[in-house]
Image (spheres, grey):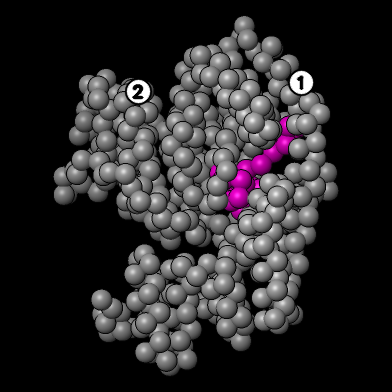
Amino acid sequence: MLWKLNFILWFSLIITLLYSCDQSPKTTPIKTPEPTKAEVHYTYYLPSDSLNIKSILIIMDPHGEPNLIMDSLQLVSNQNNIALLGLPEISNGISNHQFIIQRDLKDFIQSKNLQNIKLYLLGFSGAARMATVYAQNNRIDGLLLCGAGLGRQTELPFPTVLMAGMGDFNFMEQYYSPSDPRTFQKNTIALHFYGKHQWPPAEIITDAIGFIENRAKNTGNEMAKEFEIKSESYFQKGAYYLSFKYSEAAYKLSNEAEDEQRRNKLVALSNNKRVKNYFQQLNTMMEEEQKRYSILSESLTSKDSIWWKNQINFIENKSTNSTNTIESQSYTRTLAYMGILMYSRLNATIAGRGQYALIPTYLSIYERIEPDNPDLYFFKAVYAYTQSNDADALLFLQKAKDLGFNNLPLMNKFFSQDFINTLQ
């Protein structure tokens, strides 16, 4: 279809940005795993049967906070004898992530005297892209990507699970229709949920871990039955997209005896009138969404503040109030796209590659869309600083820091050390 070709061209323009950009909401952890030794760079959780560890799940967060999700995975760790290894030194903007992964993994394996274990990587957003790079250059047994896709690759030589909220801009990067060949490629599955750009619920990650564990061992028939039950439950609730994805996952975990039956069941589901109608609506909306992105991008240099105010109001209203779930999710993704677009333009402009006179426009739009994003206040600080308005620059930079901005190398690039030292 034409929209697929257009998407490939459009996607190539933004993929490098998505590697470094993340506007995920913070999540309050349930509890913190036991503290590890002060000289160790990582945090970890050992399953209850710590003498019989079968695999390691490396967890990477784009803000250097793996404990945000580690805490909710202790049950699946205990059930599957998986050690959890969190890497807080992994964060957006670093270039030595492969070194950090190798260093911490080697130390952990040696300190716990682990042998013959399987290795899985779990990353969110920018950290997911780092996990993909590592997986392409090193031995692993499974890859779990949250809020990021595989780029132009369609399948890797090990089980891979893609996860994203259906209101996440990165959903479009992970999406493939029932007629796509990836629907029948057994090593890859996309498990989506109702949400935005965020860590998936623990239930989704648990299903993802079960998928890669069983695919790696070729022992997935029991879990396939569980996925079939979930598929039927979602269908009864009218959640046709999720119903199809769990039916697909069930097929991909089937043993030889069940393979043909589950494949036929998946094909029959894709031809179900209600399911078929759902995907037709979704594909049409995604075509419209891509056109919307082009209009918004082109309008940055041609439309005034009144037009932008009205446009943002319209998009927010559709996102919040539309009774059509497909439409509502599309406009939610559009808001996320606009946030990424503003980040991209501001990041390029302060580096000298954009139109300096448009910075106030970018900042105004960014603040309307994501008023609590620490990057917004960092950009406001840089702009004020270049205008010799040190007082406002200090206020904005302090606000960015208070909201979680901690990229010291970037601060050093735009501010003097004396100025940075005045921060509390």
The picture places residue 62, in percent across and down from the top left corner, at 42, 54
The picture places residue 112, in percent across and down from the top left corner, at 21, 31
Q: In this view, does 233 lie to the left or right of 179?
A: left
Quarter residue 244 falls in:
top right
Estimate the spatial distance between the alpha carbons at disc 2 and disc 1, rounded to whole Å.
34 Å
Specify the farthest residue to the bottom: 388
Residue 324 vertical position relative to residue 408 in the rendered view, above or below: above
Q: In this view, does 20 lie to the left or right of 87?
A: right
The quadrant in which the N terminus is found is top right
The residue at the point 48 percent across, 84 percent down is: 383
Specify the farthest residue to the right: 2
In reply to whether residue 268 is colored magenta, the answer given is: no
Q: Which of 238 and 304 is in front in this view?
A: 238
Q: Which of 95 and 382 is in front in this view?
A: 382
Where disc 2 sits, the SS reads helix
Where disc 1 sits, the SS reads helix
Amino acid found under the numbered disc labelled 1: Ala
Question: Which residues are the magenta region?
Answer: 164-180
Residue marked by disc 1:
268
The residue at the point 58 percent across, 20 percent down is: 229
The picture places residue 366, in percent across and down from the top left corner, at 56, 72
The quadrant in which the C terminus is found is bottom left
The residue at the point 76 percent across, 67 percent down is: 295
Residue marked by disc 2:
79
**Secondary structure that dominates the magenta span:** loop
Q: Nearer the viewer, residue 46 or 305?
A: 305
Amino acid found under the numbered disc labelled 2: Gln
Q: Is residue 95 left or right of residue 163?
A: left
Q: Earlier along the polypeptide chain: callout 2 or callout 1?
A: 2
